Amino acid sequence: GTPINWHTHLTPTTTHPTPLPTYAFHHKRYWLDADTSAGRAPVPAGHPLLGTPIRVAGTDTTLFATQISARTHPHLVHHTPAGTPHLPASALVELAVHAGSQAGCPVLDQLTLANPLTLAPHTTLHLQTRLAAGDASGRRTATVFAFRDGDGDDAWIEVAEGLLRADTDGGAPADRFSGPGDEFEVRLSEDAWGEAGQYGLHPSLLEAVVTSRPGSAPEGSTSVAAEWSGVRVYAAGASVVRAVLTERGDGTVSVRLTDENGLPVATVDSLGYRTTPDERFAFAQDGGYGEPARQAAQVSAGVQEPLARRLAKLSEAERHEAVLSEVSAAVAAVLGHADAGDIDLEASFHELGFDSMTAVELRNRLSTTTGSPLPATLVFDHPTPTALAGQLLARLAVEFTNDADGSDTTLGELDRLEAELVSAARDERQRVAIAARLQTLLSRLDEGSVAAPARDVASEIAAASEDEIFDFIDKQLGRKTD
């Protein structure tokens, strides 16, 4: 809004043509938003969800106060039940466990969610966590309160209440890290990787785990992880975890998290889900603060319900929107945008700034999302995100149509084998043997002669020298070309 005196900078000797940038302009403000919290204390240093602890004078009560928004905590905004950005239950678990750890009570015996807590765009959420004095047995109650800008200073609501105690179990018992259940991997997105060390357990990791359980909520409602018991964090700062959810038979699940080496990260003895009507996720009682943010791809789970199967549960219009959302999130991640809403879905990929390298990266991301190999020319064959989404939907339609009428069980069997192969292929020798066998099967499938006799590749590898094995990998698996 300030006039520029161009004559100060452009003299007769400097007025020569200046080429414009060859990449697309980003339509994004870089100015700080106006402070809407006049008279309130600034956000203190400390834990990202708690702030600095304040000991209440004359008591053994500790108070934590902080502020959360989509701008200050962007990796919490990807949690969007019913299409509304929402502070995930895992964030409340993390702040309760951390608060208890500061007072010698690191075990979260119980946590119950009272109210959904929405994160409207351009709105600050004020949190207070009160850690009460210990009772006769040393247990302490943690209560979380919140209000949003615009609700008024007296509009505090209770969000959750938990009970914390000292760890009297003597570490991590082995039986907490064994038992039935399919193991899958969850990792932080690249842009959230650096945050892992600020948390005991990053909420995005834990939320990806607990929301991986297939939901059974009726239409118009959402299943929320609401009742937590026996939460223990053994190692802080994880950015990748292996997870197992085990059904307990009473409608709850237990959760086990380990690192990539199998060492304990966290456990949840019992987790219960609550069906919540979607209208409870409204931004505010008076009509809301704005449009919900598009869901961004912040966390990638190694094993989750295939996209085609998820699409089969949606209407035709919802399918198109879901695939378009996946495409825009992938485009935003490749281009480094914090918000998928920044992407012009009708602009060409060239206008958005794609080149051959970023086109391949987008293809790789979408191959992972869809669970299907996609051609390297994907971006060039379908010039806009909208066109690309339409093509992906057409490809996926074959899969979810077959799933719906039960006419094709092969893909379902492959889904089951995928989870087993991820676990079985950890041993290097076994991984090489499995990769060789799969490559042979793929070659026979491409040639249209699945019934042709197969070489005993596993036996050949077992009898081969190391040099022969590496030569086999290079030539047969495409690691290099002659």
Image (spheres, helix red, strand yellow):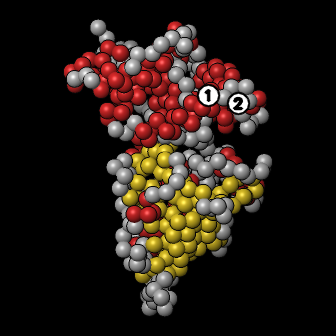
Q: Residues within 10 Å of mark 1 (few under 14, many from 20)?
A: few
Task: Name which residue lies at 49% across and 23% down.
Answer: 363
Place of residue 79 in the rendered image (x, y in percent of width and height, measured from the top left): 58, 49
Task: Name which residue lies at 62% across and 26% down.
Answer: 410
Tag 1: amino acid: Leu
Q: Residues within 10 Å of mark 2 (few under 14, many from 20)?
A: some
Q: Horizontally, is 306 left or right of 480 in the view? A: right
Q: Which residue is mark 2?
A: 403
Q: Of residues 318 and 22, which is closer to you in this image? A: 318
Q: Which residue is mark 1?
A: 411
Q: Of residues 283 and 468, which is closer to you in this image? A: 468
Distance (Cα) linking label 1 and label 2: 8 Å
Place of residue 86 in the rendered image (x, y in percent of width and height, measured from the top left): 61, 54
Place of residue 306 in the rendered image (x, y in percent of width and height, measured from the top left): 60, 35
Place of residue 334 in the rendered image (x, y in percent of width and height, measured from the top left): 46, 30
Q: Horizontally, is 223 left or right of 163 in the view? A: right
Task: Name which residue lies at 51% across and 31% down.
Answer: 368
- Is residue 15 among the parts visible in the rendering? no
Q: Secondary structure at mark 1?
A: helix
The relative height of residue 457 versus residue 289 in the rendered view (above or below) is above
Tag 2: amino acid: Asp
- Is residue 440 among the parts visible in the rendering? yes
